[in-house]
Image (cartoon, rainbow, N blue to C red):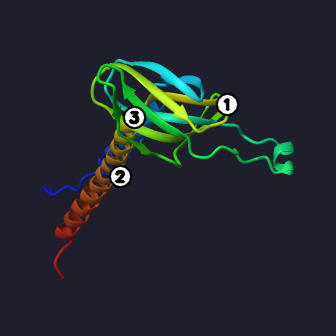
Amino acid sequence: MNPRIPPSLLWLIPAPVVFLAGVGGGLAWLFIAVSNAPIELHSFRAPGRIPFQIDNPGAYILWREVRSPGLADRLSGKARDPAGQPAVSLVQKRTAATLPGRQTLGVQRLDESRRRVAIARWDVEESGDYELQVGGVLEGSTFSFGPSQMGGITAAVVGCAVLNLAGWGGAFAIVLAVFTRRTRTHRLAEPAA
């Protein structure tokens, strides 16, 4: 009786389980993070001064609602928004200090059949009453202001990537270990010629 019995192919069953757990878990984490991202946007018309109560410190973004041009607008050449970059500032009412903001052109958000373009971001360090001042835009322009979701979504993307790599790596390691062990056991079992 040979004491060196190779592992059976049943030892490969954990490989797809580890693979599916890693890849599926990563994708589930990303899906849950994106679908549960807070949509606490307050819409308003500008120009003007708009008071806001900020309860949670963190990053806040000002979005400009951009109307998707229809066919008539494209044909007439009115597809572009005639207003340029608006003048915006966020003022803390208690101290009358203007918070430094950064331009964030290019980031877009689609929800509820509206397209929004991020135009400014502020890092708010304390809760309280604030006033958002928006000028240099056409009367009746629509804006939205709210917390940024990028931190949570970025963490979910990184977590998804880590779990995907763990799933792929774990499955590959199991398959490699089983076949290496089977090959080594077969070589040791072969009679020397």
- The residue identified by callout 3 is 29
Left or right of residue 171: residue 142? right
The one nearer the camera, 50 or 164, is: 50
The one nearer the camera, 187 or 84, is: 84
Three-letter amino acid code of the residue under disc 1: Glu
Q: Residue at x 59, y 30 (%)?
A: 47
Asked if the residue at tag 3 contacts the one at tag 1, i.e. Cβ–Cβ closer than 8 Å, the answer is: no
Three-letter amino acid code of the residue under disc 2: Trp
- The residue identified by callout 2 is 168
Left or right of residue 55: residue 32? right
- Mark found first going from the N terminus, 1 or 3: 3
Work out how far the residue at label 2 is from the one at label 1, CA to CA, in angstroms.
Answer: 54 Å
- The residue identified by callout 1 is 139
The one nearer the camera, 114 or 102, is: 102
Query: Whole-percent x and y of residue 187?
Result: 21, 70
Q: Is mark 1 on a helix, strand or loop?
A: loop
As drawn, the label of residue 118 is none
Query: Whole-percent x and y of residue 122?
Result: 38, 36
Q: Residue at x 15, y 58 (%)?
A: 4
Image depth: mark 1 or mark 3 in front: 1
Work out how far the residue at label 1 is from the one at label 3, CA to CA, in angstroms.
Answer: 42 Å
